[in-house]
Image: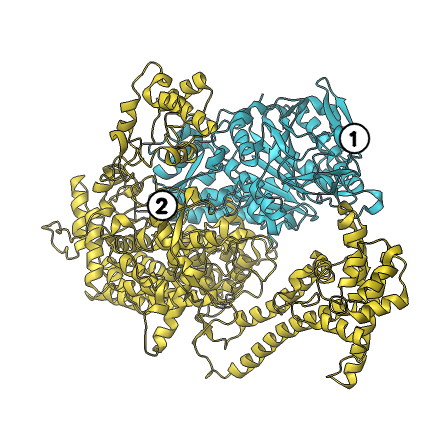
Chain colours: A cyan, B yellow
Amino acid sequence: MKTCNDVKHPLTRRDFLQQTGLGLGMIGLGTMLRQDVLGAQPQGKVKRILHIFLQGASSHIDTWDPKPALKNLDGKSINGNRLGHGSNFEFEPCGQSGLLMSSAFPNLKKFADDICVVRSMKTDVPSHDVGVRVFNTGQISLPRPSFGSWVSYGLGLENENLPAFIALNSGSVQRYSESFQSGFLPGLYQGTPINTRLNSVEQMIQNIKSPVMSLDGQRKQLDLLKKINTLHSLENNKDRELENRIKSFEIAYNMQIEATDAFDIAKESKETRDRYGNSSQGKQMLIARRLLERGVRFVQAWHGGWDHHDNLFNSLTARAKDIDGPLSQLIADLKERGMFEDTLIIMGGEFGRTPHRDGAGRNGYFGRAHQHTGFSTVLIGGCVKGGTAYGATDELGYKAVENPVHVNELHSVVLQSLGFDHKDFTYRYNGRDFRLVLPEYLENDHAKGILA
Amino acid sequence: MKKLLTLCLLLTTGLTGYGQSNDVFDKTIKPILEKNCYSCHSHEADRIKGDLTLDTQAGIESVLDNKTDLTKSTLAQQIISREMPPKKEMSSKDASLLLSWIRQGAKLPENMKKDKDSDAWGTKIQTHWAFQPQYKPEMPQFDMEGYQNPIDNFIAAKLENIGLGLSPRANKRDLIRRIYYDMLGIPPTYEDVQSFVNDNSPGAWETVVDKVLQSPHYGERWGRHWLDVARYSDYKGGSNNRRDDPRYVYAWSYRDYVIKSLNSDKPYDQFIKEQLAADLMVRGRKRTPQEMEALAGLGFLTVGRRDRNNDDVIDDRIDAVSKAFLGLTVSCARCHDHKFDPITQKDYYSFHGIFSSITEPDEFQLPVVRDTSSLKQFNEYAKLREEAIKNINKYKMDGYTKWHDHFRKTSGEYIVHTYMYYNEVPGPNRGQYSRTNEVDNVRGLVNRMMSNWNREMNSNNPFWTPYKELIKQDPKTWNVSLHKMSQDKKKYDFGVVRSLQVRKPQTKQQLANWYGNVFTVAYKDLVENKKKNPKYMPGNKLHKKAVEILLKDKGPCDLGNLDTFYRILNNRERTRYENGLRNVTAKFINLEWEHVAVPVRAMVVQERAPVTSRIYILGNARTKGDPAPRSFLEYFDKSGKVYPQNQSGRLQLAESIINNPLSSRVIVNRIWQHHFGKGIVDTPDDLGIQSPDPTHPELLDWLAVYLKENNWKLKSLHKLILTSKTYQQSSKPEAVAENLDSGNQLLHRQNIRRVEFESIRDTMFKLSNNLSNEMGGGPVNLFTKPYSKKRSIYGVIDRRNVPELLSNFDFADPNLPTGKRFNTTIPQQSLFMLNGQMAIDIIKLFCKNNVGETAAQTVTNFYKVAYQRMPTQIEVKLGVDFIQSAKPEKLTPEEQFAQVVLLSNEIIHIK
């Protein structure tokens, strides 16, 4: 067990970075070298993660945490002078496991046996900015490396021609940029935000294509550059840093081709594109698949518009429809490609919503207010106990009462699924070992029961 | 082994291992012991009872007398039998936690105080080099001709131990490029290089050294290093959804202060003092202009992150001060004593008290520390500023007036709604009621207004007492009641009673309507008549009373202060107001950032009534422990002297820091690092127990003392380093030496280094003849057209949103003090150089300025400007061949070649 006061460390990635005395220069150049030194990849089952972030905080009661008792209390006083709000969605047992699933996600029902719903999630504060921060960085107040950056740091790059961490969004995530920043971790592990609403790859990725040169022209430039650099490097007895930079231009050149290719869904057949559909999430899920296939370690897909204070039934139906089809398609494709077993899909919002009414009842449907004491997060993949629900909220869905899982503890579980001990998973910065998981959540690891 | 042990215990008890983790022990067990046992059984006890101490492992072992079954030991039995604690009952939860801890061996964490007199952190701190007193070590004697610089003696002595010596001197071109980048962050010109190469006088190098030390670019280069440490940003950071403008108006005055201080070779002790306490350094006389400008140094404290929680703001300051000046991680002791270094939680809270004892003036009204009124553009600026402030005030006033009128005009409606809301609408529906109703075309009722009216309507004002009582009665009885009320004119306003007797409302709603109507009519009458007669008051007694209620201080319609009135509004209206306010404020800040004649205003702090902070137990502000008087770190100031009662203690803190040997060690190490690419200690912000051993501890101390002997003048230190043979060595790696001195730990050669992003950008601008020498002023835009021609240090830094490009190039995280940047080489950097619009624009400019008549001339010109040397024959051939065979695209062949030249390793690596 590692705490603040252990002094000796096993050879970790971080030690490797620091003890070799070469700085981080070569790490960006791929994992080959890293494997040489570290021996092997982390031994976890999971090799890549897709995090579908339902920003705005989806209602657990209408999606993954059925509360039949609430139906009878609809419009009646509960919890003091609040009015109960029974769900307008129907739940039915699905798959062999009989996991109860909501009519909001008709297509996902066929994967009931692959889904593990954590019904006892909790977080710290029911406000969006803090909630998003806690979910994506594990920290309530301080800007720290994002969850995706930690994961990328842990797993390293699989494909050196693509960033390890890509955050797909439809724009306007600027205010949440800390959700994919690397903080004090090296810039290599920073999430690259991609606005998938933009039409072309050139618009999506900074500097991915020259505005003035063709690839052929650039090839000639780089050939000359290589010669000039080689002359320079020879004069300096092939200093390692110089050699690295020579290589980095070759990688950059390849990245232009590979990244352009990865984001170009026009390369998929029309039939495939139709299967994923035209919605924003259809496009994102298809891009996500192409990225996961190409070795991107952490894909975050932002799905906004879940803050349903009013008219919840209509709004949630529409939002769920956006993701239901495309995600089902993605799962099917991952299975077909044999990637499902070592991919982990996480879906959920920054917190949950209240069992009582909120809003004016627009279009005949009320909404729900913010709630951080109990909500659901969905895990899908070969590493989880499929067809199960972990933990529970109380009868009405206010509070996680059985096996509560704080967001930090969920992070621990994910780290474990990658093959890391969440306590050993540290990064030394400025005289301190930093951890993704806060100390108060370190010891409580019952949640690993989620894992198969 | 430890791990295995924990696992076994887990298996047998099903509980987590307390003894192994300080966090768990501190959180669960220690509080129980403190609450129940330690008042008699610890070294902190006034009188230790029964000669038993439970805060040492030995003490615990003495009552852990049944090793086969720990639960049968005296310690456990005393608790089980409830013998202990004797005078109070331990909760059963606490008792069971304690027992499970005993079952696991009752282990105290290793760093728990062993006994009162010994150090809590073991023996290591007693021998840790950085905590030792400072002395000037003896210089290793070396019988080598020409070794005149003490640095070389120290370095060569260590190299000799492994059979190595210093490398030969680098060639002159490499040397002058090295010193220009190190000291100024930009390359020399071809002519600079030539004149040095051709100067064969013995003082040639020293001339170059003196020249760079006099250059104002020195401050721009080294200032950036310090800004990394000072976690400088032009943005406040903190909360995501702050509604005010997220920018600091005058953070840049701190940046300029740093640059100027370095350029003027301000003694480093003075530099420390000014950044902590410039406001306290001059007492009882007028400040000189320099002393005025020094106030901007306080920005060191104030440019940090602005979290919503003030304790986090203080934490940021403690962190910055202790890392920057002392190389200590004091902020680790926020929740518990430092795990490794001799820093107690009490130390942390004594610093907390210091930074709790200060305030800041309004950010728009910071003191002017450099007057610019003599500039010819000043009048224009002054006018614009006045206008901008006027606009802000007008916006506030307009908003205020609008809502002021609105709430008075609609008072009649609000009275009726208030009646409905509190009397007719069931609780659960109230939210919906207030959201869906509108008054005067404003959607949604303002809850605060209804609550104000409710309070007013239920007050004992005789005007309202009839309402207050009737509303509780059946309307059928109102006739009788009103009659009774008419008898008591003192308690019930006779005018009101009389009118109600005449009007005869039949329902409660009608009663409320009647009241509302009085206000509506009264206010309308008031507004109309006031146009003619500003002093008008209604003659009608009822109307007069209503108007008095509308206008009274703290009455239902009182909006309070101009700056805060809008807080009562609903979310929607409030957001709308705040957005508008942000827009007019942004114009003001833009002006202060952009105008040439803006005076310098310092982000100062001020003293306030000093406070003594109490320890937050486990860092929790709600559970406070003992007071921690403002003072220096106890271990480092054994006198235990407490700072004066009547001051925050910042000045004294600065003095304590200066007098501590750490401060000079830290700055020497920082400077060394930037000359060699690596510090004598590799962790410049942490010289504590966990830091790696210094490669040359004696040299570090020798230099630290040297710095002090030279009045803390940093330039004297630079000069000593720059004139050493160690600095001037070649950087070329040789296989044999690399093996003997792996990683060049002992500096048998110089290091080849990639320059930072700022230098890359500045170099490209300089080579294309596009770099301005203009210094200081508001932050500028670096990355989008029109690109500022100023040096990169003047670029705007947003700590919440560091541009991807900067992150890709290892820019220091502006949220934390950073003495050492990463040095990564990643493809995104190359992509920027290859495809970035800015890079391309610069390349075109470079080409235009330097293209020759022939291809060969072009190649030669490019090499001379970019690399400050002539190309070799083979390089000319490569270049000419390329230019002649490349296909023109949007870049001409010459431009394509220019790009290659500027992309090359030679540009951005210092040899």
Q: Secondary structure at mark 1?
A: loop
Residue drawn at the location 67% of the way across and 22% of the way down: A387
In this view, B187 is above or below B736: below
Could you tell me if residue A268 is visible in this image? Answer: yes
Q: Nearer the viewer, residue B534 or A215?
A: B534
The quadrant of the image that shows the N terminus of chain A is top left
Dot 1: within a 10 Å radius of its alpha carbon, few (fewer than 14), some, or many (20 or more) residues? some
Q: Do marks 1 and 2 both belong to one polypeptide chain?
A: no
Q: Chain of mark 2?
A: B
Residue visible at 70% across and 72% down? Answer: B551
Q: Amino acid at mark 1?
A: Ser
**Residue B881, horizontal then vertical, whole percent:** 49, 53
Asked if residue B858 lies left or right of residue B560, the reply is left
Residue B197 can be seen, yes or no: no
Judging by the rendered image, the residue that carries numbered circle 2 is B345
Residue type, label 2? Gln
User: Which residue is at the far top?
Assistant: B68
Crowding near the residue tagged with mark 2, few <14, some 14–19, many ≥20 C-alpha atoms within 10 Å: many
The disc placed on residue A103 is 1
* Residue B343 rendering spot, x and y as whole percentages: 32, 45
Percent coordinates x, y for residue A251 in the rendering: 51, 41
